[in-house]
Image (cartoon, helix red, strand yellow):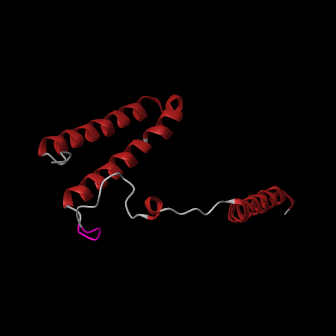
Amino acid sequence: MIEYVPILIFLLLAFGISIGAIFFSLIVGQRNAYPEKNSTYECGFEPFDDSRTRFQVKFYLVAILFIIFDLEIIFLFPWALAFNEIGLLGYISMMIFLLVLTIGFIYEWMKGALDWN
């Protein structure tokens, strides 16, 4: 159990610093609210529609495609770290993976799934 003492100390220190930062900001921080700060939108223009309207399906499609490609790109990091140990078979399998990924990206691009019009 002695191996876990540094982890316990780290967790207690992190918890103490975070709670201390919250209380310190409550005590020292200024509370000067002004109308612009309390407004719903701080983007520089007045809202033109209700905030509870439905988003277009294209928004969700682009978000899902981003997540899919982002997760597939994450597979490149362990491959790059183990590049010297995996040999020719690992290299060929990753090139096939990247080829399939590229073909899928080109297909989505040609279908117009990435256009935001």
Q: Quick check: 78 left or right of 27?
A: left
Q: Is residue 52 magenta?
A: yes
Q: Which residues are magenta?
A: 50-54
| Horizontal and vertical percent position of residue 12 | 78, 62
| Horizontal and vertical percent position of residue 4 | 80, 60
- Residue 82 visible (yes or no): no
| Horizontal and vertical percent position of residue 83 | 49, 31
Q: Nearer the viewer, residue 97 or 88?
A: 97
Q: Nearer the viewer, residue 95 or 18?
A: 18
Q: Nearer the viewer, residue 57 or 96?
A: 57
State the residue at coordinates (28%, 61%): 47
Figure quadrant of the N terminus:
bottom right
> Does 51 appear above or below 104?
below
Q: Quick check: 31 left or right of 66?
A: right
State the residue at coordinates (78%, 58%): 13
State the residue at coordinates (47%, 60%): 37
- Residue 50 visible (yes or no): yes
Number of numbered tags placed on the structure image: 0
Q: Is residue 88 magenta?
A: no
Q: Quick check: 4 left or right of 67?
A: right
Q: Quadrant of residue 11?
A: bottom right
